[in-house]
Image (cartoon, grey):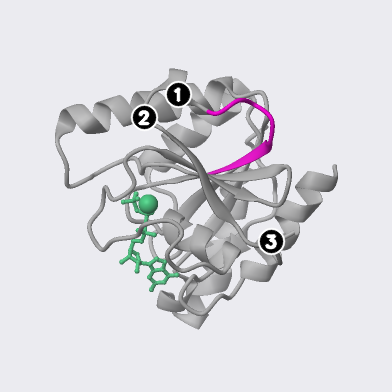
Amino acid sequence: LFAGSADFYAAAQTLDRLPPMEDVEIAFAGRSNVGKSSLINALTGRNTLARTSHTPGRTQQLNFFKVGPRLSLVDMPGYGYAAVEKAKVEAWTRLIHDYLKGRANLARVFVLIDARHGLKSLDTDVLDGLDKAAVSYQIVLTKADALKKSEVASRLAGIEAALARRPAAFPQVILTSSRDDSGVPELRAAIARLLSE
Ligand code: GTP
Ligand code: MG
């Protein structure tokens, strides 16, 4: 699936510009700067496919990347703090919300959480919304390279415990780093399994 070349396919700043619902879509959501775009690049092996930045608020629209004949990965703007105007953030927050709730071909949302920080209140708000809308999601921890080895097990256990009572959550948490590619093969395998369901 990820052996072929991935490519930019479509971008949308408003709901009416979304591409047709032909592909299976998998979306990457999470706080600004958590590493969504970097993880898409790691998955596809193309370091400049999705644009990344040190500054929160880099991704400002929904970007669709085609991987294989029937799968698109969707890079989303981040929620929370962004170094851009408030009106822009409000517009894309509405777009994220509407897309996540209303997309029939959306197979799963990977909700990215910084492994160093764990679940914050903004994250739990998003999970509440996904549970309410019955949209299947899975937690992916990012920047594992920046977490102390001794902290990994307790971080994973804490998040898995928090997911236990959430109806739309997939129970397995995947620990990743786009810097050293750890967990990236596991994430590719999870995506491949979703496609074969
Ligand atoms: P927005 O589009 O602004 O919401 O951000 P994003 O979630 O797409 O994050 P992006 O991929 O642009 O990365 C943000 C910053 O985190 C960049 O400085 C990356 O180099 C850094 N980063 C991303 N992944 C990793 C990782 O696995 N480890 C470390 N240490 N840094 C990372
Ligand atoms: Mg981004």
Residue type indicated by callout 1: Arg
* Residue depicted at x 58% and y 75%: 182
Quadrant of the image where one finds ligand 1: bottom left
Q: Secondary structure at mark 3?
A: helix
Q: Which residue is mark 2?
A: 13
Cα distance between the residues tagged 2 and 3: 27 Å
Q: Is mark 3 within 8 Å of ligand 1?
A: no
- Mark 2 surroundings: few (<14), some (14-19) or many (≥20) residues within 10 A: some
* Residue depicted at x 46% and y 69%: 47
Cα distance between the residues tagged 2 and 1: 7 Å
Where residue 175 appears, as percent x and y from the top left, is 58, 66
Residue 15 vertical placement versus 165 (above, below): above
87 sits left or right of 146 in the view? left
Residue type indicated by callout 3: Arg
117 sits left or right of 144 in the view? left
* Residue depicted at x 46% and y 77%: 145
Q: Secondary structure at mark 2?
A: loop
Q: Which residue is mark 3?
A: 188
Question: Residue 114 falls in which quadrant of the image?
Answer: bottom left
- Mark 3 surroundings: few (<14), some (14-19) or many (≥20) residues within 10 A: some
The reply to whether the C-beta atoms of the residues labelled 2 and 1 are less than 8 Å apart is: yes
Magenta range is 19-27
- Mark 1 surroundings: few (<14), some (14-19) or many (≥20) residues within 10 A: few
Question: Residue 97 falls in which quadrant of the image?
Answer: top left
Where residue 172 appears, as percent x and y from the top left, is 69, 54
Residue type indicated by callout 2: Gln
Looking at the image, the residue that sits furthest to the right is: 197
Q: Which residue is mark 1?
A: 17
